[in-house]
Amino acid sequence: MILVLLDNLFFSAKINQAAEQSGLKVKYSKRADEAFDLARAEVPSLIILDLDAAKCSPFDLIKRVKADEEMKAIPTLGFFSHVNTGVQQQAREAGCDRVLARSVFDRNLPAILSQIS
């Protein structure tokens, strides 16, 4: 199972399609606290975060997951719009394992998910 924190329907559809092709189940959340609870209940193989979705509080989720002894090993992958300068550094400082520009994430999503299955 992969856990996705975002509020963008376009990327939800893309993630669903790639996950289906890889045989992965996806759980979505639009709130960091709900996503944290989902991750605690069913440890995901990967947490994907839309770093531009400020209302979802992606940096809070990264910090909470990485501070939790039982969950800190869960890989996190954040994606962002290249025009949002500083987001990449902010994500790394929060503890995000992998940070990709939105275009790179979109292009490589099937390959990323195929490595999980």
Image (tube, grey):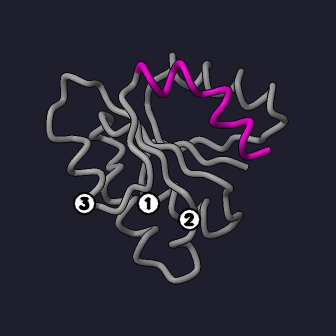
Residue 115 is a magenta residue: yes
Residue occupying the point 30% across, 41% down: 55
Residue 108: mark in rendering = none
Label 2's element?
A: helix
Instruction: Look at the magenta stretch and give its main secondary structure.
Output: helix
Give the percent coordinates (x, y) of residue 17: 71, 21
Residue occupying the point 59% across, 41% down: 28
- Viewer-proximal residue among 94 and 39: 94
Q: Which residues are magenta?
A: 103-117
Residues at circles 1 and 2 in contact by the CB criterion of under 8 Å: yes
- Viewer-proximal residue among 79 and 37: 79
Label 1's element?
A: helix
Give the percent coordinates (x, y) of residue 57: 32, 49
The Cα atoms of the two marked residues, 1 and 2, are separated by 6 Å
Label 3's element?
A: helix
Q: Earlier in the sequence, mark 1 or mark 3?
A: 1
Instruction: Please give the count of numbered marks on the rendered protein.
Output: 3
Residue 10 is a magenta residue: no
Q: Is residue 63 above or below residue 1?
A: below
Residue occupying the point 61% across, 20% down: 14
